[in-house]
Amino acid sequence: MSNVPSELRYSDTHEWARLEDDGTIVIGITDHAQHLLGDLVFVELPDEGIELKGGDEAGVVESVKAASDFYSPITGEVVEVNEELQDSPALVNTDPYGDGWLFRIQPEDTSEFDALLDADAYNEQISEEE
Amino acid sequence: MHNRTPFYQQHLDAHALMVDFFGWQMPLHYGSQIAEHNKVRQDAGMFDVSHMTVVDLLGAGGREFLRYLLANDVDRLSHPGKAIYSCMLDDQGGVLDDLIVYYRAPDNYRLILNSATRAKDLAWLEKNANGLPVFIQTRPELAMLAVQGPHAKEKLLSVLTPAQADAISTLQPFEAVDIANWFIARTGYTGEDGFECVFPAEEAETFWKKLLAAGVAPCGLGARDTLRLEAGMMLYGQDMDETTTPLESGLAWTVAWEPSSREFIGRAALEAQKESGVKRKMVGLILEDKGVIRPGYTVIVDGLNKGAVTSGTFSPTLEKSIALARVNADVGKSCQIDIRGKLKAAQVVAPRFVKHGKIIV
């Protein structure tokens, strides 16, 4: 069974999002997604400062097996990316909700966050896929 | 189709991620493909290869049949117990499959062929055996397990019966032995020392559990692919198929031209290709930039398309992306790879990266 923390929000393309106290939103890929991809060997992150729209391609995660795009579930400016992943892409496998985060975004409008799936809805989606 | 091997339950017990592999339920990995890969390079791992096709050729006509059927020559097998790798070609010299043939007795050869090509292979064997005194017997009831790695031999010896252990203790690479109902060959698909064991399916569970207790790690198809790619071993259906000949697949060394009097299927086509000059070659690639080369990516030199990647992955041993590619014969020591629209630099090398745990490029 995949780990789906209840305090996070989710996209149907397997990203998670966490609203921080400063109003920024941290994005990563879910435990379910990293498990399906297998060992990650390379992560291509978005450039800091670029504007993304909700649903835009934000970068690529590559495992031994395959390359997979990831998307920004939120519209806003990329204010930080996880540089640690350049040398240690496997952090996404070992700690997808912690040290394996991908990027931080300054949202235009937090209602987009509220509209994402909650843990129950995401759990339901991945159990249908299995 | 969802065929299950005799090790199906063992895979589930080891928490394998199971995938459909040409109709077979097979383990992709048991948690970490890279950890499994490294275990085989440094210690010992085991692979369920029971999905592969085992065919015994029985009868006095086996030798004559195989000398016509295969591009390599079974007369190179000097004594029973020897094995040889070969391509099986069609009349145009295209590769129908690659296989290992084991010489067990003058009236008994064993072929181990790919799983995905099973129906095509069997039809081709039947068609070409026409009239020869040879009986083609498939052996779907047998299990097959590969034990591979620098410590494979000592760990395997520790779980075999004294008679089996004695029988394999002197086996050289590409030799095999029959011992009671077991067939054990010193062959593999990883570039490491190791053995491939063929035995009755009802013994599968016990054998697996003994190896597990001896510290042999279960390894999935994922690790099998990265290990064979590092070792420069071609994968049928990906690195070569009916549209390519052995001469443009890095497999010229497996074609036995001598004696020139031996007629084999595809010989005339290969001779014609050799005569007119082989225009494409198989090379290895090492990516100098970050990223991963994947099958189908274009190889570019001076802005021109020079060929395509056939196999590409991340190499756990080199910690870089490596690939096999079929390119024009004039490609030199460097090229660029089109990775999703970005050109990235790669070094062109001989198609072999790792041997017995050591990087050789």
Image (spheres, coloured by chain):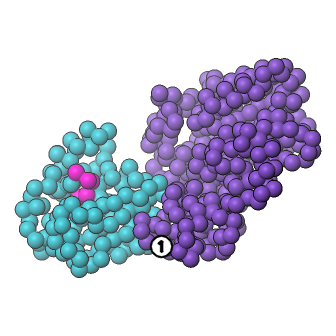
Chain colours: A cyan, B purple
Residue B41 rendering spot, x and y as whole percentages: 64, 57
Image-based side of A47 in relation to A117, left or right: right
The residue sitting at 26% across, 53% down in the picture is: A13
Residue B133 rendering spot, x and y as whole percentages: 84, 19
> From this viewpoint, is residue A39 visible?
no
Q: Nearer the viewer, residue B28 or B202?
A: B28
Q: Is residue A13 magenta?
A: yes
Residue B158 rendering spot, x and y as whole percentages: 71, 41
Q: Amino acid at mark 1?
A: Leu
Disc 1 is placed on an element classified as strand
- Report which residue position mark 1 lands on: B343
Residue B280: image quadrant is bottom right
Image-based side of A49 in relation to B82, left or right: left
- The chain identifier of the residue carrying mark 1 reads B
Count of numbered circles in the view: 1
Above or below, comparing residue A81 to residue A72 in the picture = below
Part of the protein shown in magenta: A12-18
- Give the class, few, some or many, for how many residues have Cα within 10 Å of label 1's Cα (few <14, many ≥20): some
Q: Quadrant of the N terminus of chain A?
A: top left
Above or below, comparing residue A85 to residue B187 in the picture = below
The residue sitting at 7% across, 62% down in the picture is: A111
Q: Is residue A66 magenta?
A: no
Image-based side of B357 in relation to A98, left or right: right
Q: Nearer the viewer, residue B124 or A92?
A: B124
The residue sitting at 44% across, 58% down in the picture is: A63
The residue sitting at 58% across, 73% down in the picture is: B301
Residue A58 rendering spot, x and y as whole percentages: 28, 67
